[in-house]
Amino acid sequence: MIAFVTLLLGLISGTYPIEVTVGGPVASVEYVLDGAPVAEVKGPPWTAKVDLGPEIRPRELTVRALDAQGQEIARVTQWLNLPRPPAEVEIVLEKGTDGVLRAAQLTWQSISGVKPTSLRLTLDGQPLRVDGEGRAPLPATNLKVLHVLAAELWFPPGIAARKDVAFGGEYGSEVSTELTAVPVRLHAGTALPPPGQLQGWFAAGGQALPAAAVEDGPGKVIIVRVPNGQEIFNRLITPQLRPMLRRLQKEMRLSEDDGVRFLSLASNTFRTSRVPASLFDMSQELKTVDGGMFWLLTSSRLLKESRTSRAKAALRISDAVAVAGLQAAAENHRRAVVLVLGDEVKDSSRYTPESVRGYLDSVHVPLFVWSLNGPRSPAAKAWSGAEDVSTVEKLEQAVTRLRAELDSQRIVWLEGRHLPQAIALTPEARGVEVLAGRVP
């Protein structure tokens, strides 16, 4: 058995030491990035430096455990720069020299880097004693019968991580089919046929991918707002428009089931984790019953930020847009990211706007850039242009386009697990396109 000790959560690029833990007669481990071998380790500690490149994009990192003859014993894979839970746990089964299972070893990682506040491991529903290093001896078991190990960890401030491992019996064969969600945009006047008629429309690596289902669920919008709510209000509301405020509270709504969240521009860095991580605060989800887009954009109570705290904080606009893209892709809903620009401010981001646009392309999240100062402002030019929202009327037009974009999207579930940028439409597809970062 093999499992990652280093779990790469959130958005990541550059070179990092990646550690795995192994059980059984392992002579070496091989690190494979996007199908290409990048490192080999021939003994403990099972750690190798892996260069993930300078840009953020979805990656597949696989580590293979090999025996003395170079034959694969086991492998483990983690997907990088794709939506993942904020904490994860892995279970490795340890064997003795006689091949009998002796213990279960837990490894975990949370994005904040803190230790779990509680840890529970059960075998077929019965609790096991786990030591401070996450190791639990296993009782003698009948391997002709299927057994289930279940681990559940809790991290502050209430984040749970769970993992289930089955062994014995007939386990080892495929028990479920993994699926990949692909967001597509319908062309005007078209509709997707049922899944059975989508066969041959999608491919990865030249191989056709069977379609399992089509969904039209709620839309998910993540907003990165550079000017605060009061600044937007002061820019858009003239004395003549003040009598309209009550009406504006309810106008510019998205569809009923669509949700909106706001992402902070400043981050909190956690350096206690094996790989340093940054967390961006995000608001609770808001629905149409909470108000229209004008009302939400001009609210100053959605995020815990003040003019003083924003002035002191290092604003990471581009990085926040990248995180918003990651969050928008999570849960596999219809999606979009909206960046609202105002006056030019210093951006302390690690990634450039061009790099972030490329990342949103790769995870199929459309980006809307709105500017209170018009498309020719310096801030807008840094993002290769923007839509003018300098008046209430222009903002209303922009919201209409955002709603139309969300309404045109569907989610197609394809069999198998694939990197999002590897999926393409075939010539058989009609009236549809895979979502890209730029909105047509």
Image (cartoon, grey):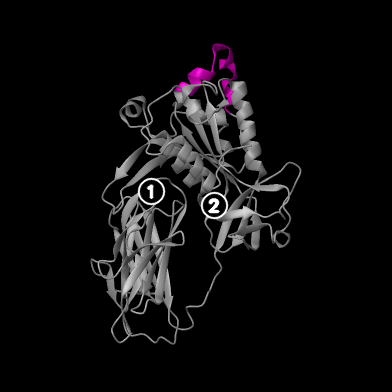
Few, some or many residues within 10 Å of mark 2 (<14, 14–19, 20+): some
Give the Cα distance between marks 2 and 1: 17 Å
Q: Secondary structure at mark 2?
A: helix
What is the quadrant of residue 257 in the picture? top right
Q: Position of residue 164 (x, y in %)?
A: 42, 69
Residue that carries the numbered disc 1 in the rendered image = 13
Q: Position of residue 217 (x, y in %)?
A: 62, 50
Residue stretch rendered in magenta on the structure: 231-249
- Up-down relation of residue 44 to residue 250 (above or below): below
The residue shown at (61%, 35%) is 402
Please tell me whether residue 104 belongs to the stretch shown in magenta: no
Query: Left or right: 325 with respect to 244?
Result: left
Q: Taking the image as drawn, is residue 433 in sight?
A: yes
The amino acid marked with disc number 2 is Gln
What is the quadrant of residue 365 in the picture? top right
Q: Position of residue 387 (x, y in %)?
A: 57, 27
Name the disc covering residue 249, or none: none
Few, some or many residues within 10 Å of mark 1 (<14, 14–19, 20+): some
